[in-house]
Amino acid sequence: MQLELPRLLIGGTQSGCGKTTVTSAILQAFVDRGQIPAAFKCGPDYIDPMFHTEVIGAPSRNLDLFLCTPDTVRALLAKNGAGAPLAVIEGVMGYYDGVGGTTTQASACDLAVQTDTPSVLVLSVKGMSLSAAAVLRGFAEFAPNTVRGVILNGVSEGMYAYYRDIIEQNTGLHVYGHLPHCPEAEIGSRHLGLITAGEIADLKERLHRLAALAARTIDLDGLLALARSAPVLPYTPFAPQPICTPPVRIGLARDRAFCFYYADSLDLLRALGAELIEFSPLHDRALPDGLHGLYLGGGYPELAREALGANRTMCDSIARAVRGSLPTIAECGGFMYLQQRIEEQPMVGVLPGAAHLEKRLQNFGYVTLTAQRDTLLCRTGQSIRAHEFHYSVSDDAGDAFRASKPLRAREWNCIHATDTLFAGYPHLHLCANPDFAINFVRRCDAYRKGK
């Protein structure tokens, strides 16, 4: 099939240059004009899409060329961009930063090339004058790319024309405007990155301030014209079919402690025949009635550990369900929650070991998981690509899978898994290997039928 979708990738020269702020400002500015874009995030990050979602009122999606094949990524872009006046994709890290730190694989550049999407770089010029042009020329010439222009972040009104002129005269790139520093619209950060969207009470007001600023200082019409220059893109649809009727009921933990899910993973479960029943481990007293499966995603359980541990009726409800063979996926924060303790706070207690917070990231980055025995999601020897991002370490991380780092000779055991359980630190994008999702839904259906 052919994808006809105006699209634009907002990349960056480096992490911290303001990609999320600029992207959110542009999204809100288009929404305020009545042109509601589709929003995407390059890579595995959960938090940036939360800001996109808050702006457009619909889930932002991840496009990740390590976790998923190029065909799957193009299909997800087409599915989730259908009917939108344009798609805005936020890049990851620096524009060329890919797998292993030594390749462009799965970088923002790789995604732009694989999807034929024009790119605009965000550059913070703090501490630079003419060197800004040298930096951008380097990005424009380093490797095959789709870079067409730049947006300057943190530039004052008085200095904008100066930077615009030296960049356009020395690089051939078009400057699509700038976003001045806006203290009243700043978004804070902490150990896992930005504060999540749901934690900022006046987020909408901040976004509208940014959008009003962007409407005045960024060439939105120029960006739209650039997006419309994207060529037609061939793709193969990703259209899984239901494997059970009526739908199985899967409980989905959703609150400020458990909020990290890939929207396309949840869509895949629904397409296969699952009804997702949201509940709050923080605030509800017990699991919803009539569940056939359970999905405990990642998030920030360490920041809510006292409240989670104090809700003993919920902990006991989950413990009974897991011990009663309710098919269960628990990723990262969900895995921590099922252990004996987080620090000294008792948790659900169905898994051995405890989670302890460290000052540095643990096993950070992409991994390939290979099953060492038959489990809930797959058979021995089958694999799926995944991602880890956590500061905690467990006394017992499990041994049902072997994790291996791409491009590096480093491997380790992980995951507690049985024929009804998958629990460990790695985050799964189920579209990376749909058979894992199919096996989960089938096991939920078997549980419903008493098998």
Image (tube, rainbow, N blue to C red):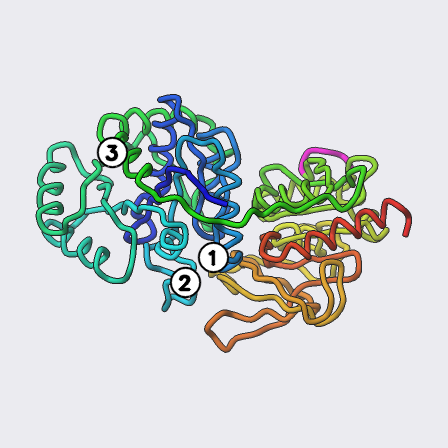
Nearer the observer: mark 2 or 3; the answer is 3
- Please provide percent x and percent y for residue 372: 70, 72
User: Would residue 18 be found to the left or right of residue 305 on screen?
Assistant: left
Task: Give the residue pinned by disc 1.
Answer: 65
Instruction: Say which element carries label 1.
Output: loop
Q: Earlier in the sequence, mark 3 or mark 1?
A: 1
Q: Main secondary structure of the magenta part?
A: loop
**Count of numbered circles on the image:** 3
- Which residue was labeled with disc 3? 222
The answer to whether residue 260 of the structure is visible from this angle is: no
Is tag 2's residue or tag 3's residue first in the polypeptide sequence?
2
Query: Is residue 186 placed above or below 9 in the rendered structure?
Result: above
Which residue is labeled 2 in the image? Answer: 105
Q: Earlier in the sequence, mark 1 or mark 2?
A: 1
Name the residue at the bottom extreme. Answer: 409
Residue that sits furthest to the right in the current view? 450
Q: Compared with residue 406, is residue 193 higher up or lower down, i.e. above or below?
A: above
Three-letter amino acid code at the position of disc 3: Gly
In the rendering, at what x and y percent does residue 107 appear? 39, 57
Q: 100 and 137: which one is in front? A: 137
Stretch of the chain drawn in magenta: 282-286
Q: Which residue is at a point 45% across and 49% down the rendered structure image?
A: 234
For the residues bearing labels 1 and 2, Cβ distance under 8 angstroms = yes
Q: Amino acid at mark 2?
A: Gln
- What distance separates the C-alpha of mark 3 from that of mark 1? 28 Å
* Gap between marks 2 and 3 measured at Cα: 29 Å
Q: Position of residue 183 (x, y in %)?
A: 29, 32
In the image, what residue occupies the spot 40% across and 30% down? 85
Q: Secondary structure at mark 3?
A: helix
